[in-house]
Image: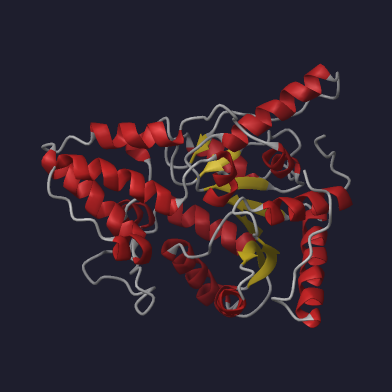
Amino acid sequence: MNNQETTLPEVFTPEERDENEKRKLELTDLLESREAMLLVGAGSSARLSYVTWDGLLTDLESLALQFGDFKKNEEKRTAKPLEYAEDIKSHIKEKRNDDLGIYYDRLSDIFEPKSQRFDDFHRLLVNLPVRGILTTNYDTVLEDALLAKKLEAQINLEERVNVDEKPLVIGQDAPRYIHQFLLARYNDPHLPQRIAHLHGIYRHPDNIILSSNDYTETYGLYVEEDSKTEGNNRSDIKEVWTLHRKILWAVLATRRVVFVGFSMDDPYFNKMLEIVGKDLWVWNKPIHFAIMSIPSDISKASQARLKAERIMRDYGIETLFYLDTDGKHQGLVDIVYEIARKLGIPIPL
């Protein structure tokens, strides 16, 4: 692991670099307060060769092509990934007479554990002093890191580590376990540390939330993926405050959330952030944090800054940037390492 403090090159002015360091200190203070909730996205598992959104859709696209005249649409795959996922799913369902078994089997295969089940980065994530870890990932990388934490404590004859490495899946597990998770382990030391999956898990692929219709049913609202119409609801969709919608609203409204491994382009998350902002009048106020990459290319870096300004203005999310020079997001690892060291968290050798 790189133990050098993260620096940003000339994509930022000296003033902007100072501002980024200030945000890093603010994030460290937030984590030290034990009041933050960690929300982990696909970028955290990509370092173990799990697919990101584009890779997932490319894989499912190849499956759809096996069953007749499916039309590839690279533009839609990029601009409207949820709708494109629905196109793929619908095509397979139609060609296989409503049998989606092969589609679900592919999802399970894509996200089942790799030979390397986690790495030092994930060990650091599960050791951060947060109230809970919520993830949209379908894999169990974080659970494997939790189990390693538990076994390591046993081997070293340390005080018993109170963790439950069994995944908690919102919408599938008993509501009382979800209630315990929302209570947060720092409110009650007897509650175990757990990982809560918001959108399903590979072991139950038929319940994975992936396509636009999955999202509409799960969150009780329809959100356009087109940037010009994002946030507009379809008139024929009756809005319902589903369990997922209630839980996400509660988390975003009552916790300060740290987004890790997110691009902040998910239209449903953004819609929920928008709803919370309107309900509580929290526009343009620093509440949450997102640790996000910034390109070394000056023009692309400018776009990243504009995006950071937008999510701050609209959703109250401060952006802490890191430079991604290797495609493996080592800059993200360096930031988490640096924060962990300042908080006195044991660093994996």
Place of residue 313 in the rendered image (x, y in percent of width and height, measured from the top left) = 59, 80
Of residue 226 and residue 281, the one placed in the foreground of this image is 226
* Residue at the (66%, 69%) spot, across then down: 319
Q: Is residue 244 above or below residue 227?
A: above
* Residue at the (70%, 27%) spot, across then down: 148
State whether residue 125 appears in this view. yes
Q: Quadrant of the N terminus?
A: top right
Place of residue 115 in the rendered image (x, y in percent of width and height, measured from the top left) = 56, 26
In the displayed structure, does residue 41 sit left or right of residue 348?
left
Of residue 211 and residue 46, the one placed in the foreground of this image is 46
Residue 290 falls in image quadrant: bottom right
Q: Quadrant of the C terminus?
A: top right
Q: Is residue 82 above or below residue 178?
A: below
Q: Is residue 115 above or below residue 95?
A: above
Q: How is the image coloured?
A: secondary structure
State whether residue 216 appears in this view. no
Of residue 329 and residue 266, the one placed in the foreground of this image is 329
In the displayed structure, does residue 184 sit left or right of residue 233?
right
Q: Is residue 314 above or below residue 93?
A: below
Place of residue 162 in the rendered image (x, y in percent of width and height, measured from the top left) = 73, 29
Place of residue 173 in the rendered image (x, y in percent of width and height, measured from the top left) = 47, 34
Residue 163 falls in image quadrant: top right
* Residue at the (75%, 79%) spot, across then down: 16
In the displayed structure, does residue 208 sit left or right of residue 67?
right
